[in-house]
Amino acid sequence: MSENTPRRPDGMGENTGAGSSAPRVEIEQGPRRPSDDSAKTTQMPSGQTGSAAGPGGGHDKGPGTTEAVPFVPSTETITRTVVKTKAKALPVFLASLGGLVVGAVLVIALAMTGAFRITSTDVEPSSSQTQTINIDAEDTTLAEAVSAKVLPSVVSISVETADGSGIGSGVILDTDGNIITNYHVIQNATSIVVTLDDGSTYEADVVGSDESSDLAVIRLKDVGDATLTPIEIGDSDSLSVGEWVMAIGSPFGNEQSVSTGIVSALYRSTAMQSTSGTTIYANMIQTDAAINPGNSGGALVNDQGQLIGINSIIESYSGSSSGVGFAIPVNYVINIANQIIDGQTPVHPYLGVSVTSVNALSARQQGLSVTSGAQVTEVTEGGPAAEAGIQAGDVVTAIDGDEVTSADGLIITLREHEVGDTVTLAVVRDGSEQNIDVTLGSDEALQSEQQDNSTGSGAGNSLTEEELRQYLEDLLGGGQGYGQNGGQGYGQNGGQGF
């Protein structure tokens, strides 16, 4: 797998917590003083320096000499605290004047850079002409409100496997203790421990999983009268690029961590492969909210604190956040989760063909009229493609007008549809293009067959290159089951640890 290939975050580490409060800056403009006003005096220990107070503040007084600070007449004066050491009057005057100049320059600079958001609504002059400008960090209130709402619904998941341990995240779906997470978080788990927001821990069992979609549902054991806060479900179909989002999870094992960002892009799709199968990520939500190892299975929420996605993979040269993370859309997640909870096998659209990618070299060698697409190498008898008239040798170049440039592209595009949908395939046959309507079937039978023939998630490791090629072709042709049971991995626990 190349360094810039999307990876799954699943991290490990100690629990830490950190918090910070945004600074609030106030500028007070005092009323004009008469020219004969007496100078302010301050007291400090002789020969000792003090620290300046903020606008409108005071300073500590102590024993020592008292010196007058000459007052400079001005139309308007910004009141500041002058901290003195024992010195002569002229240097003190120059220092005070210099401080006023520097302060004025600083205020102008901050205003020009946007650090001060000064608008007509920010300034509220009183009868004494004193004005106060309160500066709040952008989105502070929003982030705090969303965090308070969502944190109780996000959990940390610790997993033990025969090969070691790992940490991921999950989202509470209901009060029965069902929790949504990524399949790669709980893959090959021998034990699962879930930590809630209040610090309480529970063991959990796997209810079911959909390896090819990288989704799983686990259920807490012996929850009794535990307080569970199901997350509010949003609508991922209504998202817009640029929309504010928050990611919540356990990056590097740091439980209940939040990061904010925006929706960077929509409808990102990829197929991640390994010797054990293929995981399909279709219509992913891309975000620049920091997602790191350990965030897998955690929540991506909108500004209403509603779940819009399950954080799953990152694209990074280092393996840590580079501002390019991806979440599985919640509408798809809930569909799969409900099937699992209902005891059903999650199903996906089934075409019934084996395909291979067309490129410039293969096109020249075979005398094809197109240099990209998905070429059909075998048609499953009795399958949807066979019934629609698809033949071996056909090159699929589009589905419902959406261009198909490779075998993976065909699989991803089909996964965006539902079982029973009728799609129109643009097919090139003998140099001419034609459109063929196909009603997609279900890959449930294929999954059962693969499960019966499976010897474990690592079965593919002992296959020869030819056997592996045939295995992957069978998975693709088997209905874009897309590596249903074999799939799973793709760097899950052994590879990228994502």
Image: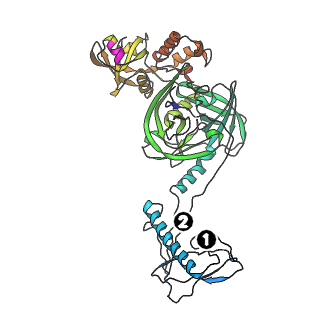
Which x, y percent locates residue 482?
49, 21
Label 2 SS: loop
Q: Amino acid at mark 1?
A: Ala
Which x, y percent locates residue 293?
59, 36
Q: Quadrant of the C terminus?
A: top right
Of residue 417 and residue 339, the one placed in the foreground of this image is: 417
Residue linked to disc 2: 25
Looking at the image, residue 370 sits to the left or right of residue 245; the answer is left
**Number of marks drawn:** 2
Magenta residues, dominant SS class: helix
Residue 414 visible within the image:
yes
Query: Label 1 to label 2, Cα distance in Å?
Result: 13 Å
Q: Which residues are magenta?
A: 359-364
The 10 Å Cα crowd at callout 1, few under 14, some 14 to 19, many 20 or more, is some
Residue linked to disc 1: 53
Which x, y percent locates residue 16?
67, 45
Above or below for 331 versus 135: above
Looking at the image, residue 277 sits to the left or right of residue 201; the answer is left
The nearer-to-camera label among 1 and 2 is 1
Marks 1/2 in contact by CB < 8 Å: the verdict is no
Of residue 94 and residue 155, the one placed in the foreground of this image is: 94
Which x, y percent locates residue 252?
63, 39
> Nearer the N terminus, badge 1 or badge 2?
2
Above or below for 352 versus 337: above
Q: Amino acid at mark 2?
A: Val
Looking at the image, residue 155 sits to the left or right of residue 471; the answer is right
Q: Quadrant of residue 339?
A: top right
